[in-house]
């Protein structure tokens, strides 16, 4: 099924919509980046994954410093939410009403940002994390947690999100990782759950390999070239 676009929405030529995408009233996709002194990248594109729903008055800006602003598959962007230039948003992400992503924000799969939540530029939100309403995220948020407050701090494990994703079997290992995280460098275990989680936490701890704000707290031996992996994302020159 082709995309369904409200007649009042504005879709710039740099935008590529996937199958079964819905774009609501007065949304603007591919508009100029809102970054003083930085025009849109000359070869920049905005990619919207299959099955993503974009409600009214949503804005997704064209990239400036990189060739891509990306929103993954089956995302849900509610009224008034904003995805700034050069953001990479994974699959199944929800941005509630007026949630705002600063430039170069990376959001991993199935994260949820509540009403009026916001991210500082160059911030990373880990997969399956939930950000509380009105929370300003000025630092990276680990995967699998609930974070809220000002300043933003992760408070507990996102048990509901994990169980909805049928990841109950990972709960003990994640709790162990987060407990040790607060006490300093971590030595990885050998269980199946630890093996499954190792690349996820390496990705976060390595600061995405781009000078980000993530703290390498796993003994300092993580690969600094790790980057966010979005299934199905193909970036062409």
Image (tube, rainbow, N blue to C red):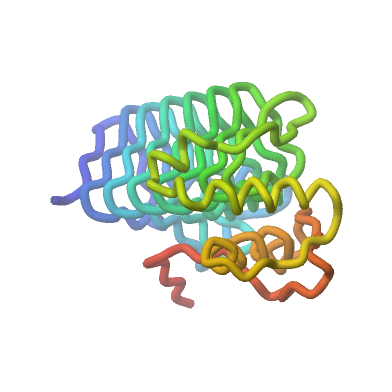
Residue at image location 36% in from the left, 36% down from the top: 54
Residue 81 falls left or right of residue 227: left
User: From this viewpoint, is residue 226 visible?
Assistant: yes
Q: How many marks?
A: 0
Q: Nearer the viewer, residue 169 or 90?
A: 169
| x and y, in percent, of residue 111 in the image | 51, 43
Residue at image location 72% in from the left, 24% down from the top: 149
| x and y, in percent, of residue 103 in the image | 65, 47
Residue 195 falls left or right of residue 54: right
User: Taking 223 as reference, is 92 above or below it?
Assistant: above
Residue at image location 56% in from the left, 56% down from the top: 63
Residue at image location 60% in from the left, 26% down from the top: 132
Extreme left residue here? Answer: 1
User: From this viewpoint, is residue 85 visible?
Assistant: no
Q: Nearer the viewer, residue 36 or 81?
A: 81
Quadrant in the picture for residue 147: top right
| x and y, in percent, of residue 219 in the image | 83, 68
Q: Nearer the viewer, residue 177 or 141?
A: 177
Q: Nearer the viewer, residue 225 or 178?
A: 178
User: Taking 5 as reference, is 232 above or below it?
Assistant: below
| x and y, in percent, of residue 126 in the image | 60, 49
Residue 139 falls left or right of residue 117: right
């Amino acid at each position: 099924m082709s995309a369904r676009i409200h007649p009042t929405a504005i879709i710039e030529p740099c935008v590529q919509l996937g199958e079964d995408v819905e774009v609501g009233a007065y949304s603007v996709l591919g508009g100029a980046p809102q970054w003083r002194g930085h025009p849109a990248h000359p070869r920049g594109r905005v990619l919207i994954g299959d099955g993503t729903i974009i409600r009214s008055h949503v804005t997704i800006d064209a990239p400036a410093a990189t060739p891509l602003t990306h929103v993954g598959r089956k995302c849900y962007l509610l009224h008034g939410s904003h995805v700034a230039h050069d953001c990479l948003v994974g699959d199944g992400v929800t941005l509630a009403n007026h949630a705002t992503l600063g430039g170069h924000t990376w959001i991993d799969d199935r994260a949820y940002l509540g009403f009026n939540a916001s991210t500082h530029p160059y911030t990373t939100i880990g997969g399956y994390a939930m950000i509380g309403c009105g929370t300003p995220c000025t630092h990276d948020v680990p995967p699998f947690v609930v974070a809220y407050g000002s300043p933003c701090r992760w408070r507990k494990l996102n048990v509901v999100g994990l169980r909805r994703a049928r990841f109950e079997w990972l709960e003990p290992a994640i709790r162990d990782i987060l407990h040790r995280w607060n006490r300093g460098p971590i030595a990885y275990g050998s269980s199946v759950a630890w093996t499954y989680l190792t690349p996820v936490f390496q990705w976060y701890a390595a600061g995405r390999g781009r000078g980000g704000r993530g703290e390498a707290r796993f003994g300092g031996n993580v690969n600094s070239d790790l980057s966010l992996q979005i299934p199905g994302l193909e970036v062409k020159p």
